[in-house]
């Protein structure tokens, strides 16, 4: 698809959203559980997210009020779209506990810090909060529009910055909610952990995922897993090792067992974004978090 065609599709999508009914936006409130995470937690609809990104600064967008209408017609929190079936919302449905979802696509450990401040100012994170769940880290390796697999990462520097940010985050959380239990949640496995270490980008033939070996992605997943485990130890948080627990449910798993969609994917059931969790994957994470609260 050409760049011009993609833009056109995004603009038409935004226009359609403008004309759709718009439910009232939810207001932040003091919550029993507060979640901070990246796109594996937020997991919004890809077309809405693309439309918002593509048309946000256009003159047509300004005329139609597209960004405002997208936010009004879809779950969100302070500028970040969030899927109605993402794991924080499934966690609330499963436990009956009030969950304030502050997850945001693209967030890094550095962006976690002002996000916590926003939750405090909004009255979501208070002395009444009993649990705070954090699931960020992989985006700390992000450079530009995609993970640069050929980059010579200074993994020690990335880890130092990550641990420093998580210690500061824990300080902010405990200042606002001194009685809260902090839980660190890992990331669903994208690549196979052993053997070919494939990522299956093309899933269009039933039960025949097509992938290529990409060991650097597996390495980044493992580095992220190690960073999260170390951070949890340093800040006195529980760590849920979702990567290890989901090893058989990667992009290359059989259709019924796949918890992360491919890039072009018609065989993974119910997913919102390419290379992101399916509904079943989000359900699994919600179940693990529920058991740790």
Image: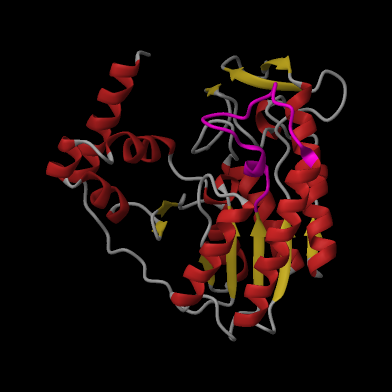
Report whether 145 appears left or right of 62. Answer: right
Q: Is residue 153 magenta?
A: yes
Q: Name the colour scheme.
A: secondary structure
Q: Residue at position x 49%, y 79% from top?
A: 30
Vertically, is 14 above or below 264? Answer: below
Of residues 105 and 200, the one drawn nearer to the viewer in this rendering: 105
Q: Position of residue 234 (x, y in %)?
A: 83, 65
Report whether 156 appears left or right of 20. Answer: right
Vertically, is 212 above or below 77? Answer: above
Is residue 26 at least partly visible in the picture? yes
- SS assignment for the magenta stretch, majority: loop
Residue 179 sits in quarter: bottom right
Report whether 170 appears left or right of 96. Answer: right
Q: Position of residue 134 (x, y in %)?
A: 66, 60
Q: Is residue 94 magenta?
A: no
Q: Position of residue 166 (x, y in %)?
A: 70, 61
Q: Residue at position x 59%, y 86% from top?
A: 127
**Outermost residue to the left:** 63
Vertically, is 271 above or below 38? Answer: above
Report whether 114 appears left or right of 208. Answer: left
Is residue 243 at least partly visible in the picture? no
Q: Position of residue 215 (x, y in %)?
A: 79, 23
**Outermost residue to the right:** 195
Q: Residue at position x 57%, y 29% from top?
A: 146
- Point out the stretch of residues depicted in magenta: 136-155
């Amino acid at each position: 698809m050409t760049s011009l065609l993609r833009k056109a599709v995004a603009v038409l999508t935004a226009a359609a959203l403008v004309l759709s009914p718009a439910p009232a936006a939810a207001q932040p409130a003091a919550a029993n559980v507060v979640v901070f995470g990246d796109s594996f937690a937020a997991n919004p609809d890809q077309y809405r997210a693309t439309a918002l990104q593509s048309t946000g600064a256009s003159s047509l967008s300004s005329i139609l009020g597209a960004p405002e209408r997208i936010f009004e017609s879809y779950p969100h929190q302070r500028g970040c779209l969030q899927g109605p079936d993402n794991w924080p919302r499934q966690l609330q449905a499963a436990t009956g506990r009030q969950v304030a979802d502050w997850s945001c696509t693209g967030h890094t450990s550095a962006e976690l810090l002002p996000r916590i401040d926003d939750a405090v100012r909004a009255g979501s994170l208070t002395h009444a909060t009993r649990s705070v769940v954090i699931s960020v880290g992989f985006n700390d390796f992000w450079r530009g529009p995609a993970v640069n697999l050929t980059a010579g990462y200074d993994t020690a520097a990335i880890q130092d910055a990550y641990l420093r940010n998580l210690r500061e985050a824990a300080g902010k959380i405990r200042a606002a909610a001194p009685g809260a239990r902090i839980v660190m949640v890992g990331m669903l496995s994208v690549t196979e952990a052993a053997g070919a270490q494939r990522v299956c980008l093309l899933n269009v033939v039933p039960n025949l995922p097509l992938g290529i070996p990409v060991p650097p992605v597996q390495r980044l997943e493992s580095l992220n897993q190690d960073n999260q485990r170390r951070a949890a130890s340093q800040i006195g948080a529980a760590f849920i090792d979702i990567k290890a627990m989901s090893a058989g449910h990667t992009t290359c798993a059989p259709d019924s067992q796949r918890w992360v969609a491919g890039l072009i994917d018609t065989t993974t059931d119910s997913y919102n974004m390419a290379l992101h969790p399916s509904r079943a994957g989000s359900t699994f994470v919600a179940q693990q978090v529920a058991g740790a609260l």
